[in-house]
Amino acid sequence: MAFATLTDVFVDQIDDLSSAESQLVEALPKLAAAASDDKLRDAIELHLEQTQGQIERLEKIRTLLGISSEEKKCRGMAGLIAEGDETIKVSGAGPAKDAAIIAAAQRVEHYEIAAYGTARTLADELGFEDAKRLLGETLDEESAADQLLSRLATGGIFRGGINADANV
């Protein structure tokens, strides 16, 4: 693919996001299974459901804009998932392991936030209002997932959360 126009860049971003989300659908169940904290496991499983909906939104964008799918592998997500797999394989359990799982999951969320933010900005620049709205919905979900992981790690203002329990 050549980048002759912003539309070319936008299509490339959609292809990359589709690959990233598909890889994540396969990886999240392993991450959830490795979590010992029920709230963390529930948060990961919720995000798996959301990720499936995000894939549907990306397909809707393709349909709305007449974009054909390019076979592409998101190497950034592949690397983040590989790091998450390493985290799962490290010995340990309980709050410390859960804190490591949260760290791996938040790296994924931050990557997705950056990618969806870029794609939404491109959609806005190109006047793709429906795509901009759909990408914005996903961006909101990714941000909420990141905030939930932070709350689980820190427990909010008055509680210690997983990180405090791991400090023993």
Image (cartoon, rainbow, N blue to C red):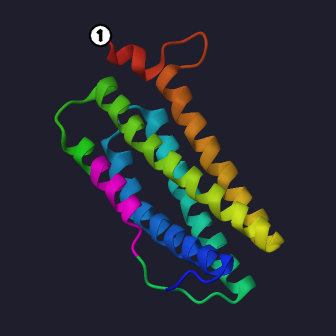
Res 118 → quadrant: bottom right
Q: Is residue 146 above or below residue 160?
A: below
Please, which residue is most extreme toward the front here? Answer: 4
* 59 to 110, vertically: above or below: below
Q: Secondary structure at mark 1?
A: loop
Q: Please determine whether, in this image, residue 148 is positioned above or below residue 160.
A: below
**Callout 1: 10 Å neighbours few (<14), some, many (20+)?**
few
Residue 14, image x, y percentages: 58, 73
Quadrant that contains the C terminus: top left
The residue located at (46%, 71%) in the rendering is 19
User: Which x, y percent locates residue 10?
Assistant: 63, 74
What residue lies at 64% left-to-right and 87% top-to-bottom? 67
Given the current orientation, which residue lies at the most extreme left position?
91
Which quadrant holds residue 166?
Answer: top left
Q: Considering depth in this image, is 157 or 118 the residue closer to the camera?
A: 118
Q: Quadrant of residue 135?
A: bottom right
Residue 32 in the image: state x and y as whole percent.
Answer: 39, 46
Amino acid on which disc 1 is placed: Val
- What residue sits 46% from the left and 36% below the top? 40
Residue annotated with mark 1: 168
Question: Which residue is painted at 53% across and 30% down in the image?
Answer: 150
In this rendering, position of residue 146 left or right of residue 38: right
Q: Main secondary structure of the magenta part?
A: helix
Image spot of residue 66 (x, y percent): 69, 90
**Residue 74 magenta:** yes
Question: How many numbered tags mark residues here?
Answer: 1
Residue range highlighted in magenta: 73-84
* Residue 88 colored in magenta in the image: no
